[in-house]
Image: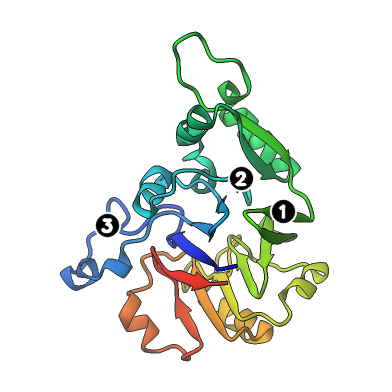
Amino acid sequence: MNAEVVVLGSGTSSGVPTLGFEYPESFLANPKNHRSRPSILFRTELGNVLVDCAPEMRLQLFQEGVLSVECVIVTHGHADHIMGMDDLRGYSLKSGRPVLVYANEETQEDIRRVFPYAFEPPPPGVMLPNFDVRPVPDVVRAAGLEIQTFPLVHGRWTVTGLRCRDFAYLTDVNLIPDESWAYLDGLETLVLDAVRYKPHPNHFNFEQAMDVAQRIGARTTFFTHLSHDYDHDAVEATMPPNIRLAYDGLRIPL
């Protein structure tokens, strides 16, 4: 069965360009330097699995022509990963049933706190989102895929990492627990957090991400959750050929 991963968003929590900053015209002229908040889509002929709901989610999915999702996996409850969830209302309205959302316990609490109205019957004539939030299983089976889940450390938060076939997605991470390394053997493609050049308390920076990428040894690694530190073409020219920068719209065969 043909399948692919689409990188819907490759930017850090503020997006790139970031409000309040000035940028050279050459930076802005490159579409790969325009980064929406981080999210990916597993896409097959049987359906779609969305990972995270960025603030730009509606635009990201409209751009890809995504008319339905079988389920949503939310890696953690930070704003750049959940604030698009309200726009899932269109899917629940069309299908007539709640949108299935998988999340760890802490993230479930965040979703219920931010979107309490998505768990209550809506007033007559009002269109509201409707979520069916469940604990993230060890394996998410959807759209004909088996997506393994495992924990990552993101400062004081636990984030859900993902592996499907020979692809893995590690967003918002500054430490890979010992028990999670086994999920990262034999990868063809890795998408890995590398937020900026300076050290960060909750994310791998560029140097750390390079070390982790080399230890994992995937055939190709793409850095994501990228700040405006990264001028795409200029930075890629300095990197090993098997380590690249992700960009919005990147497609990765599974």
Q: Disc 3 designates what residue? A: 21
| Whether residue 89 can be seen here | yes
| Whether residue 156 can be seen here | no
Q: Residue at x 49, y 35 (%)?
A: 91
Answer above or below: position of 210 versus 7: below
Screen quadrant of the N terminus: bottom right
Q: Disc 2 designates what residue? A: 71
Q: Earlier in the sequence, mark 3 or mark 1?
A: 3
Q: Disc 1 designates what residue? A: 140
Residue type for callout 2: Cys
Looking at the rendered image, the disc whose residue lies closer to the viewer, 3 or 1, is: 1
Front residue of 101/153: it is 101
At which x and y percent is residue 197?
47, 74
Residue type for callout 1: Val
Mark 1 lies on a secondary structure that is: strand
At which x and y percent is residue 199?
54, 70
Mark 2 lies on a secondary structure that is: strand
Residue type for callout 3: Phe
Mark 2 touches mark 3? (CB < 8 Å): no
At which x and y percent is residue 80?
49, 48
Q: Residue at x 61, y 66 (%)?
A: 169
